[in-house]
Amino acid sequence: EDGTQNSYAMSASLILKARQHGEMIAFYHSHPDSCASPSTQDLAIMTMGDQPSWPDMIWIIGSVYNARCVDIRAYVWNARLTRFVRIE
């Protein structure tokens, strides 16, 4: 994390280490004062070129307004559509 409210960072080596020690199925983060949809920055992290960075992971995003979570959405990679889609 860079210490700002507007971004986050994940170390690939820490993710790999965590996955070796147990089942890791999702990433979670929040969007303060914004919707629970992937931002441009999120999509840059979630993908490498036209492929997912972590193809078997669920991406969960919470929308937070006035210190309250007002929406939570989850996204998975759809290989046929070659993009992330919301889990309904």
Image (cartoon, rainbow, N blue to C red):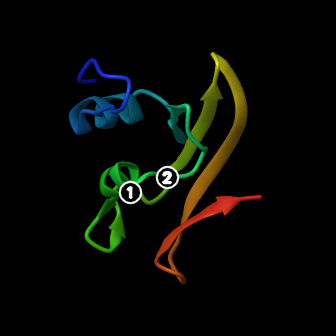
Q: Residue at x 56, y 39 (%)?
A: 34
Q: Amino acid at mark 1?
A: Leu
Q: Quadrant of residue 87?
A: bottom right
Question: The C terminus appears in which quarter of the rendering?
Answer: bottom right
Q: Quadrant of residue 61?
A: top right
Residue 74 x, y percent position in the rendering: 64, 49
Helix, strand or loop at mark 1 = helix
Name the secondary structure under disc 2.
loop
Disc sitting over residue 38 in the figure = 2
Residue at position x 50%, y 77% from top? 79
Residue 69 appears at what percent x and percent y? 69, 26
Inspect the image, locate mark 2, and give the three-letter code of the amino acid beneath it: Pro
Circle 2 crowding by C-alpha within 10 Å: few under 14, some 14–19, many from 20: some
> Which residue corresponds to mark 1?
43
As rendered, which of 26 and 21 lies closer to the eye?
26
Q: Identify the residue at image location x=65%, y=60%.
A: 86
Residue 36: x percent and y percent?
60, 44
